[in-house]
């Protein structure tokens, strides 16, 4: 899962990036509205944490411009002002959730997981495909009830496939959602992660769509 | 009806006193002039009659007195006709008198010889008469006679009375006419002030933002100044709010950083440090939250001319609630007539209703319902949930600042305290009751709002 963190306050931006990376996300950061608008329009994110008070272009304008362009990326708004009219405006502009500052990091993570899950059409925080379960709250993966250890990249690949279970996902799409922007992306490495996941989970769950990508499906 | 301290009263009282005094003085003077004119005429007539009488007297050789000829006026021969003459000797004993006196005598005061006198006497048949009296010396006999002519005053007085009543009637009519004109002038002249008063009341009730209408040159500048003051006040509140918002922004982000850093400290094993910092940061956060909410609200309740439709605000808030409490699956419904409005500022209403709805959503099992209705002196607003409710003895506590019933629910624990502060700032009341849905109901009364249609 790959998220964009837009926050102009350096201290908070770093904390957010650190915490989200620790939770298994690939994190891109932007410190102003214009960059954020550009990144959100050109890159594929699974969610955006968007501060409203931004230099160059305020968060609400950024959000509106994405929504007008048909970008439905889930957006969690952060704001320090916290007036209700601002919340109404934010939600009406297409935000998926709203968190007033100061907030607790756990609260932010819970809300972020929820909007990602909902965007993929899942009601429960516990994703299940056949014998495989992924708890978005704890980032734990289990096969028939027994825990499976995954590296960060493996987790991101599997999490993306599980959120989009039953759908074919291309290699490049996977790569976009697994790596942060500054990472040297190579869709061949995705094959490596898929290979490792198949070794840990068994060969049947992740199917290869020839010439395109992969599909996670219980047989 | 008209207060003694009103302008209308002053102007009217002044005009009426002036009209009364002027007409009164005019009446007295006209009446006096007419009387002196009538009396002068009367005196002339008496004088003429006296001349006739004196000219007609002939003294006989033996000292008797006779009239050479009858006086012309027939009334002298008609009993009690009102016109009389009498001739007395020097000692005042009547010698001859007109036939009209019949068996009566003019009771002339005894004045000796010489001067003419004009006296009012009680004449025959109880008539009040005025008598001109003169002593003349008969040339032949060197004898003094006292001549008198008298006329009943009734005729004179009747004509004076008739004149006075005509005078009073016409002056009275004139007075009434002037008074009506004064009333019309005062009320007509003060009409723009009445309109200004109505316009002000409208602003006060929140029906209009500014004083509206065209006013005369004398008060138009006042109206313009008042509108400017209203504008300025609104701008002042707006500025204060902006500053509060900026302060919020500049304080809350560092607070978030500190809180997160504290969490990191805890995770890295510096538990005691985190335990000291955590509650302090939390306290700062609450203080900032509370005072910013107060700052946002403080000015607005006193800005007149604010009027916020209820439904759009509540609908916006409901959309937010559905979104931010989506995870808990709370169904938010509204039953608010579209024509209801709140006499006050939009942000304040949002703060009140937002906090109440948010709180209800946090505690609800699955349903939150907001409803409102117009009452004679304002509006009532209910926010109901189907949560666990609250025992009556705890209901007062939740309005206290910083009180939190349950640490598990997030939020500053300030929501209800801010709501109560705001509601009271607007002169309203808020209390907790049992909700029909099974949980808690917030019952709020806000004065001054009502039906949008009622305004005219």
Image: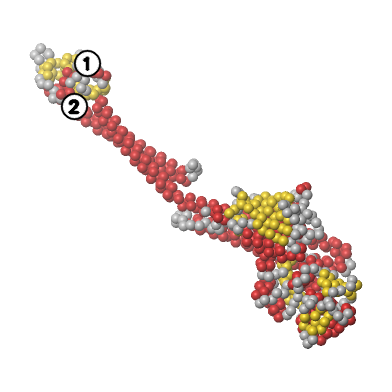
Q: Quadrant of the C terminus of chain A?
A: bottom right
Q: Which residue lies furthest to the front in this view?
A: A219
**Which residue in the structure is indicated by mark 2?**
B47
**Which residue in the structure is indicated by mark 1?**
B104
The residue located at (79%, 59%) in the rendering is: B409
Q: Where is residue B22 in the image (x, y as percent from the top left)?
A: 36, 39
Q: Is residue B72 placed above or below B238 in the rendered structure?
A: above
- Gap in angstroms between the C-alphas marked 2 and 1: 22 Å
**Mark carried by residue A174:** none
The residue located at (88%, 69%) in the rendering is: B268
Q: Which of marks 2 and 1 is nearer the N terminus?
A: 2
Relative side of A95 to B77, left or right = right
User: Which-is-in-front pick, marks 2 and 1?
Assistant: 1
10 Å crowding of disc 1: few (<14), some (14-19), many (20+): some
Residue B3 visible at all: yes
Q: In which quarter of the image is the N terminus of chain A?
A: bottom right
Residue B59 sits in which quadrant?
top left
Q: Position of residue A100 (x, y in %)?
A: 73, 65
Q: Residue furthest right?
A: A146
Q: Where is residue B160 in the image (x, y as percent from the top left)?
A: 27, 31
In the depicted view, which residue is nearer to us: A217 or B345?
A217
Residue A13 sits in which quadrant?
bottom right
10 Å crowding of disc 2: few (<14), some (14-19), many (20+): some
Relative side of B404 to B198, left or right = right
The residue located at (75%, 55%) in the rendering is: B386
In the depicted view, which residue is nearer to us: B121 or B363?
B363
In the depicted view, which residue is nearer to us: B44 or B159?
B159
């Amino acid at each position: 899962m790959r998220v964009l963190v837009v926050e102009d306050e350096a201290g908070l931006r770093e904390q957010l990036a650190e915490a989200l990376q620790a939770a298994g996300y690939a994190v891109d950061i932007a410190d102003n509205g214009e960059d954020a608008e550009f990144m959100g329009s050109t890159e594929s994110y699974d969610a955006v944490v968007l501060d409203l008070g931004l230099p160059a272009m305020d968060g609400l304008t950024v959000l509106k411009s994405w929504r007008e362009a048909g970008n439905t990326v889930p957006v969690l708004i952060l704001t320090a002002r916290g007036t209700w009219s601002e919340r109404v405006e934010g939600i009406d502009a297409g935000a998926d959730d709203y968190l007033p500052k100061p907030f607790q990091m756990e609260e932010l993570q819970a809300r972020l997981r929820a909007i990602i899950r909902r965007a993929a059409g899942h009601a429960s925080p516990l994703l299940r495909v056949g014998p495989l379960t992924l708890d978005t709250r704890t980032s734990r993966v289990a096969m028939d009830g027994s825990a499976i250890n995954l590296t960060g990249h493996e987790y991101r690949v599997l999490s993306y496939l599980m959120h989009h279970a039953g759908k074919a996902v291309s290699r490049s799409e996977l790569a976009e959602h697994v790596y942060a922007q500054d990472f040297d992306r190579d869709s061949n490495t995705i094959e490596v992660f898929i290979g490792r996941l198949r070794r840990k989970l068994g060969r049947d769950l992740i199917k290869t769509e020839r010439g395109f990508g992969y599909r996670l499906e219980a047989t | 009806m008209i207060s003694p301290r009103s302008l209308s009263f002053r102007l009217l009282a002044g005009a009426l006193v002036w009209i009364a005094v002027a007409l009164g003085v005019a009446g007295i003077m006209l009446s006096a002039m007419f009387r002196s004119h009538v009396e002068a005429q009367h005196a002339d007539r008496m004088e003429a009659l006296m001349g006739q009488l004196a000219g007609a007297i002939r003294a006989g050789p033996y000292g008797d007195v006779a009239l050479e000829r009858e006086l012309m006026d027939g009334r002298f021969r008609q009993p009690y006709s009102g016109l009389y003459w009498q001739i007395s000797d020097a000692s005042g004993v009547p010698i001859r008198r007109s036939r009209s006196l019949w068996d009566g005598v003019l009771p002339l005061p005894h004045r000796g010889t010489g001067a003419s006198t004009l006296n009012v006497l009680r004449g025959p048949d109880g008539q009040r008469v005025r008598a001109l009296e003169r002593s003349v010396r008969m040339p032949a006999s060197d004898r003094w006679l006292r001549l008198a002519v008298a006329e009943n005053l009734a005729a004179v007085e009747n004509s004076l009375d008739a004149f006075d009543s005509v005078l009073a009637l016409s002056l009275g009519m004139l007075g009434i006419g002037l008074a009506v004109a004064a009333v019309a002038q005062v009320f007509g002249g003060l009409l723009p002030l009445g309109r200004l008063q109505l316009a002000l009341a409208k602003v006060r009730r929140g029906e209009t933002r500014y004083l509206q209408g065209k006013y005369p040159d004398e008060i138009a500048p006042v109206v313009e100044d008042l509108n400017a003051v209203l504008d300025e006040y609104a701008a002042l509140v707006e500025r204060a709010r902006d500053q509060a918002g900026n302060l919020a922004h500049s304080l809350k982000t560092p607070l978030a950083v500190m809180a997160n850093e504290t969490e990191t400290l805890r995770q890295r094993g510096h538990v005691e440090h985190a335990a000291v910092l955590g509650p302090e940061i939390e306290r700062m956060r609450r203080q900032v939250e509370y005072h910013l909410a107060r700052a946002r609200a403080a000015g607005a309740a006193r800005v007149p001319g604010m009027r916020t439709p209820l439904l759009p605000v509540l609908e916006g808030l409901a959309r937010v609630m559905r979104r931010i409490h989506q995870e808990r699956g709370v169904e938010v419904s509204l039953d608010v007539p579209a024509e209801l409005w709140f006499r006050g500022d939009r942000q304040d209403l949002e703060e009140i209703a937002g906090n109440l709805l948010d709180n209800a959503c946090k505690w609800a099992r699955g349903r939150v319902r907001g409803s409102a209705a117009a009452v004679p002196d304002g509006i009532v607003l209910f926010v109901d949930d189907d949560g666990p409710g609250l025992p009556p003895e705890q209901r007062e506590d939740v309005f206290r600042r910083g009180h939190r019933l349950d640490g598990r629910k997030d939020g500053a624990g300030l929501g209800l305290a801010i709501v109560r502060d705001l509601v009271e700032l607007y002169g309203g009341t808020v209390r907790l009751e049992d909700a029909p849905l099974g949980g808690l109901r917030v019952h709020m009364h806000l004065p001054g709002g009502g039906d949008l249609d009622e305004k005219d």
